């Protein structure tokens, strides 16, 4: 049974999609006026992980994520740069998609753009007016919060409390006196000169931000949604307003389970564009493997705040290397298995693998506790290292040992972490410089690092046999300079990446 924390009820609940076996999930996408930072990336990685895990559990997931491609910030940037808002939005939408691909985040099943969904938004605004929950003022349309008694139910505040907070906020600032209440928010904004606009029953204008998500989620998923996600900074006002709009228009529940991710922080302060303490995702990915970034993110619970630092990134890289080295070792032992008697304790290995799987599922079923799930994997990796140290595996046992390694790879894959450990279809992890080294010291003429390392090992073995210690040592030192270590094991020599 999968349990998740529902921000609306403020409890962990059993997760039950409306349609059995099919999860319909909506996660708010970016406003495309700049490159995204690693705080934004945290939220997208969290929901990608949740999606992947649900799929691994055998559920069908339909995942919709919008792109907000018309907005004040986009228009401002376009004016500053003397380009059209559409040009700015196109550039950063493409950049966002490229960044997500580079991060290993799956494409949504549908990625609607606000500017292409205006008719659905107009229809929704009209439905809210027809239900008596919105009013028109000089071409603007506002949601009337006082007309809707459950306004505030998601964020858990009542209108009067919010009002006093809001008054502090606008003190000294401009109060929009066309609104009946300061908390009323725009569903439709009348066109201003030089801004993109669309025709509507209330005159030319453009949609408010919140109405987009209400319209697009209903259009592509139907109501009620099973899951609606985003960062916790979106609970109020964005998600509060989405709920109010949809429920005011249709009188049905908008969403059954609201999920919100914790903020990525720098020195305990939220990473944000406005504070200027942000690091762009694409910059970080220049020197960090995407799976290391994900490892860092998943070591914290998705709802907890996470402090980002280079130190934690280095720790995540070391953790991942530990797993990859262990898997490389395991795969190598299986590949080089011979006829000799096995000395490995197969029962212990099988039992450890089964326990890892059970603990992984238990942790993930409990509100997607990725830290616990990784903990189960690390525990088993430690056992694998101990079990396989100084052992021989015979051909008969090799398949079972390999299956244990493949289970580690599968579970990491369920979290979206792709490991490099020499298994088929993945890189071997050896640097390209091994090819030149092998050409020089072993007469190797190909271009594959894995073959090059093997050629070096063969040359070293031949040199040792001929008691040519100078050549053998030169090969060892050459590899060492590339961060590779030769280990002599009961099944022969092998090379590992220094961790
Ligand atoms: P925005 O483009 O600002 O609407 O943000 C896109 C997504 O990133 C939203 O789901 C936000 O909640 C999320 N987000 C923004 N800043 C952070 C942060 N520092 N940590 C985690 N998520 C964030
Ligand atoms: Zn949204």
Image: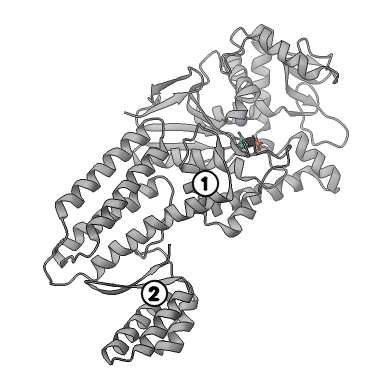
User: Residue 240's x, y, as percent?
Assistant: 61, 20
User: Residue 62's x, y, as percent?
Assistant: 46, 37
Nearer the observer, 321 or 99: 321
Q: Say left or right for 35 vs 260.
A: right
Q: Secondary structure at mark 1?
A: loop
Which of the two marks, 1 or 2, is nearer to us in this view?
2
Residue annotated with mark 2: 450
Kindly identify the residue that appears in the image at 43 percent across and 77 percent down.
479
Kindly identify the residue that appears in the image at 77 percent across and 19 percent down.
169
**Quarter the C terminus occupies:** bottom left
User: Residue 391's x, y, as percent?
Assistant: 20, 64
Asked if residue 132 can be seen in this view, the reply is no
- Residue 286 vs 221, above or below: the answer is below
Question: Rounded to the nearest whole Å, what is the CA distance between mark 1 and mark 2?
Answer: 32 Å
Q: Which mark is residue 107?
A: 1
- Residue 212 vs 394, above or below: the answer is above
User: Residue 90's x, y, as percent?
Assistant: 70, 48
- Residue 249 vs 305, above or below: the answer is above
Nearer the observer, 327 or 143: 327
Asked if residue 478 can be seen in this view, the reply is yes
- Residue 355 vs 434, above or below: the answer is above
Q: Secondary structure at mark 2?
A: helix
Kindly identify the residue that appears in the image at 29 percent across and 38 percent down.
359
Q: Residues within 10 Å of mark 1 (few under 14, many from 20)?
A: some
Q: Say left or right for 156 vs 436.
A: right
């Amino acid at each position: 049974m999968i349990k998740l924390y529902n921000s609306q009820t403020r409890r962990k609940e059993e997760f039950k999609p409306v349609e059995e076996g099919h999860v319909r999930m909506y996660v708010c996408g970016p406003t495309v006026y700049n490159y995204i930072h690693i705080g934004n990336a945290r939220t997208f990685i969290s929901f990608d992980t949740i999606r992947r895990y649900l799929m691994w559990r055998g559920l069908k997931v339909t995942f919709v994520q919008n792109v907000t491609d018309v907005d004040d910030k986009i228009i401002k940037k376009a004016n500053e740069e003397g380009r059209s808002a559409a040009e700015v939005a196109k550039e950063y939408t493409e950049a966002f998609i490229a960044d997500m691909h580079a991060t290993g985040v799956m494409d949504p099943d549908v990625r609607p753009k606000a500017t292409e969904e205006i008719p659905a938004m107009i229809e929704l605004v009209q439905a809210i007016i027809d239900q008596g929950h919105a009013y028109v003022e000089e071409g603007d349309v506002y949601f009337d919060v006082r007309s809707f008694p459950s306004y505030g139910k998601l964020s858990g505040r009542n209108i009067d409390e919010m009002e006093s907070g809001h008054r502090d906020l606008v003190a000294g600032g401009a109060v929009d006196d066309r609104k009946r209440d300061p908390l009323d928010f725009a569903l439709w904004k009348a066109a201003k000169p030089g801004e993109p606009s669309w025709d509507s029953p209330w005159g030319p204008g453009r949609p408010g931000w919140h109405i987009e998500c209400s319209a697009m989620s209903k259009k592509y998923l139907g109501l009620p949604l099973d899951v609606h996600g985003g960062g916790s900074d979106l609970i109020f006002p964005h998600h509060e307003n989405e709920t109010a709009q949809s429920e005011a228009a249709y009188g049905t529940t908008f969403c059954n389970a609201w999920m919100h991710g914790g903020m990525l922080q720098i020195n305990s302060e939220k990473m944000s564009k406005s504070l200027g303490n942000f690091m762009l995702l694409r910059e970080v990915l220049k020197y960090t493997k995407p799976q290391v970034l994900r490892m860092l993110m998943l070591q914290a619970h998705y709802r907890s705040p996470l402090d980002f630092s280079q130190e934690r990134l280095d720790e995540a890289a070391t953790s991942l290397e530990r797993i990859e080295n262990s898997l490389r070792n395991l795969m190598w032992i299986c590949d080089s298995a011979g006829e000799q008697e096995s000395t490995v304790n197969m029962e212990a290995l099988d039992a450890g693998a089964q326990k890892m799987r059970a603990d992984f599922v238990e942790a993930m079923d409990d509100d997607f506790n990725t830290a616990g799930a990784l903990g189960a994997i690390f525990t088993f990796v430690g056992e694998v290292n101990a079990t396989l140290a100084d052992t021989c595996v015979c051909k008969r046992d090799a398949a079972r040992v390999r299956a244990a390694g493949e289970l580690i790879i599968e579970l990491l894959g369920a979290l979206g972490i792709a490991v490099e450990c020499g298994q088929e279809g993945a890189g071997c992890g050896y640097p390209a410089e091994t090819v030149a080294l092998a050409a020089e010291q072993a007469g190797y003429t190909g271009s594959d690092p894995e073959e090059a390392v093997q050629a070096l090992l063969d040359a070293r073995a031949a040199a040792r046999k001929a008691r040519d210690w100078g050549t053998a040592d030169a090969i060892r030192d050459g590899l060492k300079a590339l961060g590779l270590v030769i280990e002599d094991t009961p099944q022969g020599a092998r090379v590992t990446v220094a961790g």
